[in-house]
Image (tube, rainbow, N blue to C red):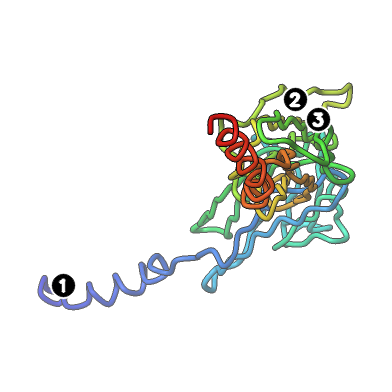
Amino acid sequence: MGTSAAFRYLPLFAFCCFAHEGVAMKWVRFSVPSWASRGEDAVLTCQFDLEGERLYSVKWYKAGREFYRYVPGDWPPQQAFAHHGITVDVSQSNHETVTLREVTLEADGRYKCEVLTEAPLFRTLVKSAAMHVVELPQGSPYVTGGELEYNLGDIVNLTCTAPRSIPPATLTWYINDQEAPQDYLVQYPATVDQSGRYEAQLGLQFRAERWHFVDDRVTLRCTASIHRLYEEEVHHSGVVVHPLVPALFEDQTAGAASILPVRQVLVILWLLLFS
């Protein structure tokens, strides 16, 4: 075969041999919960499109250590490996999802899914994401301090406390639905118990002024939140006490009317005395 003939068949040869190389496997959905509650199940998802290739294995890792694999050519195809803080529910797992049963705080970390196709290409997909495990507070925040009535100039002093949690709840104070200024806030360090749970506290302190009261009432609100997993709030309200006004200044017109006859009598006496 001549050189020209060889080049004439080269494009067809290249297409036959490398067309498969052009096919690209791709992700369909990869999902690791950003936040999971301690004691609840967590589902990790690793869905993919192999574009006609055959699956060799799906492997899951945490902190570089494999804890679950799915290999269609093995029997059984599923295997779970011991990993501190992780318990795989094999009955609820397959080649696309892995269910972690009753996650612990040790399950917090980065998870990686690795997908591998069969020989001869051994194409690979790898993706990872972090999951944070929290322990939510039991109940709502509560407020200590404060009064039912305030005089203008009084010091308003309250403390908002959130139940223990991991991580500590984020507290925010509002005055009449407006977030309190930073210089009104009193920061307290979160205390921690033997289980590693934090109790968050935030104080509110300011001098009562006329503009703090709407229709003679001030409404204070404290919210506690941990991302979108927990949101609770507590309210406190008080009324302004108006100072007593002396009777002499309550009705100046009436007072002037009552004093006028006395002046008239004094004038008459003065005229009689010097006449």
Image coords of residue 273 (percent x, y): 59, 30
Q: What element carries label 2?
A: loop
The three-letter code of the residue at mark 1 reads: Phe
Image coords of residue 57 (percent x, y): 66, 56
Mark pair 2, 1: CA separation? 77 Å
Image coords of residue 270 (percent x, y): 58, 33
Mark pair 2, 3: CA separation? 5 Å
Q: Is mark 3 on a helix, strand or loop?
A: strand
In front of the other: 40 or 150: 150
Image coords of residue 98 (percent x, y): 76, 56
- Label count reads 3
Q: Nearer the viewer, mark 2 or mark 1?
A: 2
Dot 2 corresponds to which residue?
190
In the drawing, does residue 137 fall left or right of residue 115?
A: right
In front of the other: 62 or 172: 172
The three-letter code of the residue at mark 3 reads: Glu
Name the residue located 59 percent from the left edge and 35 percent from the top edge.
Answer: 272
Quadrant including the N terminus: bottom left
Upstream in sequence: badge 1 or badge 3:
1
Dot 3 corresponds to which residue?
199
Upstream in sequence: badge 2 or badge 1:
1
Q: What element carries label 1?
A: helix
Dot 1 corresponds to which residue?
7
**CB-based contact (under 8 Å), mark 2 and mark 3:** yes
In the drawing, does residue 152 fall left or right of residue 25?
A: right
The three-letter code of the residue at mark 2 reads: Ala
Around disc 1, counting alpha carbons within 10 Å, would you say few (fewer than 14), some (14 to 19), or many (20 or more)? few
Residue 162 sits in which quadrant? top right
**Rendered view: 245 above or below 26:** above
In front of the other: 105 or 182: 182
Around disc 2, counting alpha carbons within 10 Å, would you say few (fewer than 14), some (14 to 19), or many (20 or more)? some
